[in-house]
Amino acid sequence: MDCAKGNPLCQRLYAALFDVLEEGIHVLDAQGRTLVYNQKMADIESLDRDEVASSTLSELFSFPAREGSTLLHALTTGTALHHVRQTYFNRFGKSITTVNDTLPIVAHGKLLGAIEIARPVASTPDKINEAKLKGAAHYHFDDIVGNSRSITHVVEQAKRACRTRSSVLIVGETGTGKELIAQSLHNASDRSGGPFVSQNCAALPESLMEGMLFGTMRGAFTGALDRPGLLETADGGTFLLDELNSLGVPLQAKLLRFLEDRVVQRIGANKGRVVDVRILATVNEDPEALMASHQLRKDLYFRLGVVILRIPPLRERREDIPLLVPPFIARYNRLYHLRVRSVSAEVMDLFHQHEWPGNVRELEHLIEGAMNLIGDEEIIGVEHLPPHLQSRLPSLPVLQHEESHQTAVHPLPLLNTSTLRDTPFQEQVKNFQRTLIHSALARQKGNVSAAAKDLQLSRQNLQYYLRHL
């Protein structure tokens, strides 16, 4: 049977074969049109197959702005993605999470399309695979936002470190983007085609962590199975130990032995196996302090810290805040179907004054929270921020939602200095504020916007004072 010429019988045969598979299959041609969409994929995405065949991906799904569609990535770049976990939404708002292998279809040097093989996360219970897939390297150096000297210096150092297999220790407070740097290191190295495996050392008790890292042999202990550890799983690629300071000291000693000979010996095994894996690690505290408190072995620190990258906290690169805000707004516009354009000048001022104990992650969560509270406005205002940030505005009570129409200007009484002695302090402050506002309005001939600019207030804040003083 010749299937090369579009034989209808072959097409029906292929369709029948695709429909008995346990994985979802979606194939696009070079123009992004759907060629194959099997029943399993329709079940995963809760869509009608005929609807998919007549629609574009952008009409059917919304994807997080930074990650995007793995299928479109393979189609537009011609590069394959393996074991990538993806969360996205169908047009009805249903959240879908799959693990994908996505490949470009190339013939005679020409890109003909792309195929995606998807498995719903619920059908991937194996903890080793889950750990591997959670650590799939999505990020590249281009995803790191900022022009400050401190962050550009770190990025340049990290790019140079991509050239070798030396271990790298990434130091930074919680929320600074340590894993983003780690994934970028992997994707820019000659190991980018291999696995990227990540394990948070604080996520599991120490009794389970050794088996997760080094693997087990059947019978080694009750319930033990023949199972490779994460270090074996990462063979040929990169392994990230996140929050290394949460790893118990005895396990740190075993990890040190592995770093010296690169031999993995499963629990219960008589011999080990040499693996080729690059080790990255992160700590969220000062390494010197961790060693002083015996949370980090000195010999492990010196062995891992061949290259040490220090990620600056957000308070040390405040000039990057205006660059970080727009991508977060774009992400949550897409997720929540909003049309927010920016933040107000007052909000940006607060952002520049804030200490950011949670760093970039805290900034993202503040933006997300504000976009949950915003109405039809296109600008995030102070009133959309948490109370602890609103209270930082000087001499301004916590704001409520303001009407957008212009407030009529009424004459405000001038300060009567002869009565100050018998006037309570708060009333004196209000009288002084009335005087300042009256003077500004008089100078600007009753123009509220001009008076607000004169007083270095937003028009909205001036309207608030006009109504409440």
Image (cartoon, grey):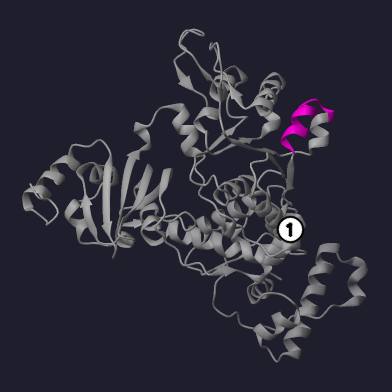
Q: Is residue 467 left or right of residue 130?
A: right
Q: Quadrant of residue 465?
A: bottom right
Q: Is residue 391 visible?
A: no
Q: Is residue 2 left or right of residue 181?
A: left
Which residue shows up at 54% across the image and 54% down it? 368
Q: Is residue 251 visible?
A: yes
Q: In the displayed structure, would residue 54 be above or below residue 407? A: above
Return the residue nearer the eye: 165 or 324: 165
Quick check: is 88 in the magenta stretch?
no
**Magenta residues (range):** 292-305
Q: In the displayed structure, would residue 231 be above or below residue 307? A: above
Residue 73 % position (x, y): 40, 57
Q: Mark 1: which amino acid?
A: His
Q: Is residue 374 left or right of residue 438?
A: left
Which residue shows up at 49% across the image and 41% down it? 194
Q: Is residue 429 left or right of residue 252?
A: right
In the current view of this chain or complex, which residue is farthest to the bottom?
445
Residue 320 % position (x, y): 68, 63
